[in-house]
Image (cartoon, helix red, strand yellow):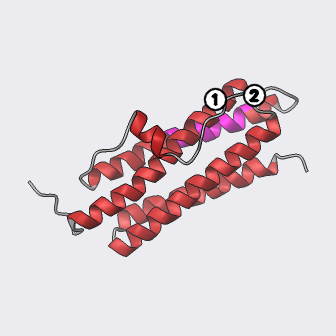
Amino acid sequence: MALDIGIDAKTRKKVAGALEQVLADTYSLYAKTHGYHWNIEGPRFLTLHTLFETQYNELWLSLDLIAERIRSLGHYAPFGNSIATKSTIKGDTVVPSEDEMLANLAAGNEAVVKAARAALETAEEAGDQATADLMTQRVSIGEKAAWMLRAHLAK
């Protein structure tokens, strides 16, 4: 049975593709944030440990929303290696300092915001209000997370 949500198949595929980038970047940022939570050390340990936990929990919940939106558009959500290779956020080879963690996570949130803005534009062009609403939320949450991380950076 064909999916009938008022958006043609070609357009749904384009929107789903944009969402795949948001999902991949969000998944990578989730993993990085959680890893930093486990490995944070230093004088701001408790503050940053708690901040990172709050942020990785929010990212984890958002993954389901994004993946389910891709499924709602009639496409499979990427997983495993396909999600890792698509992400613009790369993993670390060593545990960075507190400030490097903060800067890396701020940049990661900005990458998610960039992908979400692109998906938002694609969704708006397609007349896909549900995806546009989801991406508007992701932009807002990502911008706030980046701001909070940068506020902790030593000047």
Say whether residue 139 is left or right of residue 24.
right
Would residue 50 be counted in the magenta stretch? yes
Alpha carbon distance from label 2 to label 1: 9 Å
The amino acid sitting under disc 2 is Ile
Are the residues at dot 2 and dot 1 in contact (C-beta closer than 8 Å)?
Answer: no
Query: Which label number is shown at residue 35?
Result: 1
Q: Position of residue 113 (x, y in %)?
A: 57, 58
The residue lying at 71 percent from left, 25 percent from top is 39
Label 2 neighbour load within 10 Å: few <14, some 14-19, many 20+: some
Q: Secondary structure at mark 1?
A: helix
| Residue in the picture at 52% in, 58% down | 115
Label the magenta part by its dominant secondary structure: helix
- Check disc 2 and report the residue beneath it: 40
Give how far across and how far down residue 80 sits, in percent: 40, 33
| Magenta residues (range) | 49-60
- Rendered location of residue 63, percent (x, y): 45, 43
